Amino acid sequence: FSIDHSTHSLFGASKVAADVMVQEYGRYFGMKTACFRGGCLTGAHHAGVELHGFLAYLMKVATGGGTYRIFGYKGKQVRDNIHSKDVCRAFHIFYENPRCGAVYNLGGGRQNSVSLIEAIAKAEEVTGKKMHTVYVEDNRVGDHICYISDLSKMREELPGWDITVSLDEIFEEMAREMMG
C-alpha cells in the first residue's frame, strides 16, 4: 500500500526514514545492512503500554487489573506477534550470512495472528481472570485494521529460521512471568 496521503505518527515516520536510509547505505556503499520490519515484537519481559506493546500491555492488564480499552473496529483488528527469541534468531542467522540492503518482514505471520477480541479471551483463559474492558467507538488514529507479516522472504533467504514460539506459548509465558 502507498504511504502517501495516509495518516502517520511521528514514530511511524521515523521508522520509514530509518528503513530507507539503511537500504540506501547498503546499496550505495555495499554495506551489509538489513531492515527488519517488525510486527508486534513481544515476550514476557516486554514493558508494554496502551499505545505500544499490544500483547504485553493486554497481559499486564489481564494479570494486574485495570481497564483495557478497545479502540474501534469492534475489537476485530488483527496483529501478528513474534517472540523475542525468534527475533534474536533472525538477527543471528542474518549476521552469519549478511547481504547488502536486505529488507525483511519480521513478525509472527498468520500462525501467530490474533484479533483483540481473541486475545482478550485467551488472556482470560490463561490467567483464569475476567478482564474489565471498555469499548471506545472511535478508531485509534493511524491504527491498522489488520497486520499480518508475509514471512516468505525470511524463510527463503534465512535458512533455518522460522517461528518456534507459538502464540499459545507466548500467552502462557507472559501469564506465568507476570503472575509470579
Image (cartoon, rainbow, N blue to C red):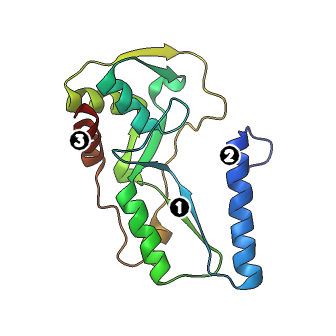
Does 9 sit left or right of 91 as displayed?
right
Rendered residue at 24%/32% (across/down): 179
Would residue 82 be seen by someone viewing this image from the given angle? yes
Q: Quadrant of the C terminus?
A: top left
Does 41 sit left or right of 125 as displayed?
right
Q: Which residue is mark 3?
A: 172
Which mark sits nearer the N-terminus, 2 or 3?
2
Would residue 1 be seen by someone viewing this image from the given angle? no
Which mark sits nearer the N-terminus, 1 or 3?
1
* Number of residues whose C-alpha sits closer than 10 Å to that of mark 1, classed few (under 14), some (14–19) or many (20 or more): some
Seen from the viewer's position, the closer of residues 100 and 111 is 100
Q: Position of residue 119 (x, y in %)?
A: 35, 33
The three-letter amino acid code for the residue at tag 3 is Glu
Indicate whether 52 appears above or below 27.
above
Rendered residue at 34%/28% (across/down): 120
Q: How many marks?
A: 3
Where disc 3 sits, the SS reads: helix
* Number of residues whose C-alpha sits closer than 10 Å to that of mark 3, classed few (under 14), some (14–19) or many (20 or more): some
Indicate whether 98 appears above or below 69.
below
Indicate whether 109 appears above or below 152.
above
Q: Which residue is mark 2?
A: 12
Residue 7 occupies which quadrant of the picture?
top right
Q: Which mark is residue 105?
A: 1
The three-letter amino acid code for the residue at tag 2 is Gly
Q: Position of residue 69 (x, y in %)?
A: 48, 20
The three-letter amino acid code for the residue at tag 1 is Asn
Where disc 1 sits, the SS reads: strand
Q: Position of residue 115 (x, y in %)?
A: 41, 35
Does 36 sit left or right of 115 as displayed?
right
